[in-house]
Image: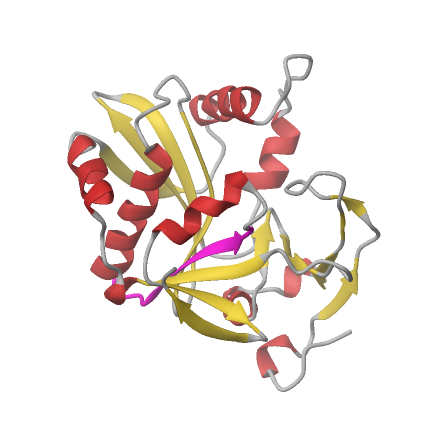
Amino acid sequence: MSLPNNKDLDRIQFYVTTKYSCGYIKHQSAQSLVATPYKKVNNKAYSNLIQQGFRRSGQYVYKPHCGNCQACIPIRLSVNNFSISRSQKRVKKTHGNIQAKVLPLKFNEEHYELYIQYQNNRHRSQNESEDDIADYNEFLIKSNVESKLIEFRINNKLVMISIIDLLENGLSAVYTFYDCKYKKNSFGTFSILWLIDYCINNGVPYLYLGYWINQSNKMRYKINFKPYELMIDSSWQEASN
């Protein structure tokens, strides 16, 4: 399977995975369309794929390809049109003491420990835990495109990490994890607000947030940043509600 009329994608083919358990909707199976070989997905091809609704996980670039479900809808923000809400202004003011640093994407033990704490707190049951450096590296540290790591600290204490990809027409927010001891500090919201400012300051027009899934509480928050654009019928359309 190939995507037509795009010279940057000529040497890339696409395959559909077997079915697997959906991580967002209970009792639902899922499939993905994956670009291969992943070593051929350079920054230019990747930027084109992101604009067509794809996403990156480690070295793999994919998009949902589920026959009976279209719940995963690509979402992006046109940063120059973004209108900050009152509650978002309060979040920025609350975190005025956060120091952010843009770093190369590479393994760091302190970052890894924060990731494990986040995963065990947010995404694991009491009988499960995650502690695997190889999985962490495969998921977040390995990348064939131009990626960066944003380190957020309060009084030199690490509180949050955001991993981003730099695109030709914007920035893709790959993954964010934070110290769950600060449950009411809205770090997730602050990270997106910081990335919006980063895009504006660097002259890139779009911040890609992956997929909005209305049926998933974990993914619903993305429409709190308005106006936003959704990919509907293969084209980006502005929405605000």
Question: Quadrant of the rendered structure where residue 93 is?
Answer: top left
- Circle count: 0
Q: Residue at x 20, y 20 (%)?
A: 155
Among the 4 quarters of the image, the one containing residue 178: top left
Residue drawn 59% across and 35% down? 137
Image x and y of residue 209, in percent:
45, 54
Q: Which coloring applies here?
A: secondary structure
Q: Quadrant of the N terminus?
A: bottom right
Q: Image point 22% across, 31% down: which residue? A: 98
Which quarter of the figure is the C terminus placed in?
A: bottom left
Using the image, determine if residue 188 lies above or below residue 241: above
- Residue 163 spot, x, y in % from top left: 44, 43
Q: Residue furthest right?
A: 18
Specify whether 78 is left or right of 121.
Answer: left
- Residue under the image location 23 percent in, 49 percent down: 85
Viewer-closest of 131 and 81: 81
Q: Is residue 171 magenta?
A: no
**Which residue is at the front of the view, 118 or 217?**
217
Residues rendered magenta in the picture = 202-213
> Relative to 221, does residue 183 appear above or below in the rendering?
above
Residue projecting furthest to the bottom: 5
Residue at the far top: name it. Answer: 127
Is 189 on the left or on the right of 214, as rendered?
left
- The location of residue 169, given as percent across then percent down, is 39, 69
Q: Nearer the viewer, residue 32 or 149?
A: 32
Q: Is 73 located above or below residue 5 in the figure? A: above
Q: Is residue 209 magenta?
A: yes
Q: Is residue 13 left or right of residue 8?
A: right
The picture places residue 201, in percent across and down from the top left corner, at 21, 58
